[in-house]
Image (cartoon, helix red, strand yellow):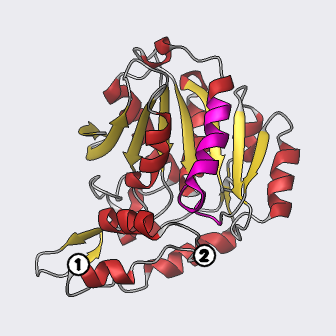
């Protein structure tokens, strides 16, 4: 794994790379309040054949915080474009979990010529008005501060909280989610302003226009993407594939890493990819 900083849209952003940069590119987009290191297990599993790139979205992980009004889905999609440009990636498969699924769909709508395929993981690719209001309420919760790192790691919880993840993997995720502030206490690294301005939206129309392979992945026990809504999503996109991962809730890649890797790797291996996919970017107005 290689960490890399780059400039994008006036911000200092970070990504991590695995595998040969000349191999077909697979760009990994995490969910809200998460970070790029959620993808470590999966990236390790595909690095023998693919150039895996996990991006810390603006305001998350080690990427710079933005103005509170610059955390919209299209702002994140602009950072995906900047990441591909910085790494010289012409085309990529985008894999997005939750919020990252929305970001992947948004990018697909604006730059389909730079997209090889989409994998959308436990995301409805929409934000309802009720969902936007819920996110806004979360924004006003106080930022928890802990006296020491051990306490911060012990108190760390996923949202939603249901998970089957191995405790060692959760500890790994938690370690990279926390940082020490100037007074010596510890807190979550992500910018709570990312929750400030969610907008109701639906990215399904853009996906209907997309002439690229799409795989939807759902955790079999997910409450954020219930089975009936998953079925409706697949019915609306008859060219798309859909797979449910057993023994997994919303945080699919953490709850059942081997099954998730097997399903997504099988999809990737069927794509008409070549090592040229990691080459120079074609002209784009994205």
Q: Is residue 279 magenta?
A: no
Most frequent secondary structure within the magenta stretch: helix
**How many labels were placed on the picture?**
2
Label 2 Cα crowd, 10 Å radius (few <14 / some 14-19 / many 20+): some
Residue shown at 69% from the left, 49% from the top: 217
Residue shown at 36% from the left, 63% from the top: 172
Q: Which residue is mark 2?
A: 162
Residue shown at 39% from the left, 17% from the top: 22
Q: Name the quarter where the N terminus is drawn.
A: top left
Q: Position of residue 102 (x, y in %)?
A: 59, 50
User: In the rendered image of this protein, does residue 258 appear above or below residue 150?
Assistant: above
Q: Mark 1 falls on what kind of element?
A: helix
Q: Position of residue 52 (x, y in %)?
A: 44, 34
User: In the rendered image of this protein, does residue 62 appear above or below residue 270?
Assistant: below
Q: Position of residue 280 (x, y in %)?
A: 39, 14
User: In the rendered image of this protein, does residue 154 appear above or below residue 127?
Assistant: below
Report whether 198 appears left or right of 173: right
Q: Position of residue 118 (x, y in %)?
A: 63, 36
Viewer can see residue 87: yes
Residues tagged 2 and 1 counted as in contact (Cβ below 8 A): no
Q: Which residue is mark 1?
A: 149
Specify which label sits upstream in the sequence, 2 or 1. 1
Range shown magenta:
249-268
Q: Is residue 255 magenta?
A: yes
| Front one among 269 and 9 | 269
Report whether 196 appears left or right of 114: left
């Amino acid at each position: 794994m290689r960490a890399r900083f780059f400039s994008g849209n006036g911000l200092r952003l970070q990504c991590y790379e695995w595998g040969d940069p000349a191999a077909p590119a697979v760009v990994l987009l995490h969910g809200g309040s998460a970070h790029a290191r959620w993808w470590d297990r999966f990236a390790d599993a595909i690095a023998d054949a693919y150039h895996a790139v996990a991006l810390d979205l603006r305001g998350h992980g080690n990427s710079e915080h933005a103005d509170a009004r610059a955390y919209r889905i299209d702002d994140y999609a602009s950072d995906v474009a900047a990441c591909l440009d910085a790494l010289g990636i012409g085309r990529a498969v985008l894999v997005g979990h939750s919020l990252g699924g929305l970001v992947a769909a948004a990018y697909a709508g604006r730059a389909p010529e730079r997209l090889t395929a989409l994998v959308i993981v436990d995301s409805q690719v929409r934000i309802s008005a009720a969902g936007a209001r819920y996110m806004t309420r979360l924004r006003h919760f106080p930022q928890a501060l802990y006296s020491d790192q051990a306490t911060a790691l012990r108190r760390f919880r996923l949202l939603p909280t249901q998970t089957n993840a191995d405790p060692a993997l959760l500890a790994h995720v938690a370690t990279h989610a926390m940082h020490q502030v100037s007074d010596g206490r510890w807190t979550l690294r992500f910018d709570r302003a990312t929750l400030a301005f969610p907008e109701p939206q639906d990215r399904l129309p853009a996906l209907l226009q997309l002439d690229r392979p799409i795989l939807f992945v759902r955790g079999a026990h997910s409450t954020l993407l219930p089975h009936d809504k998953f079925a409706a999503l697949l019915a609306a996109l008859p060219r798309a594939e859909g797979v449910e991962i057993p023994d997994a809730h919303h945080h699919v890649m953490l709850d059942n890493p081997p099954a998730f890797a097997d399903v997504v790797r099988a999809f990737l291996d069927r794509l008409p990819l070549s090592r040229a996919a990691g080459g120079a970017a074609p002209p784009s107005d994205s």
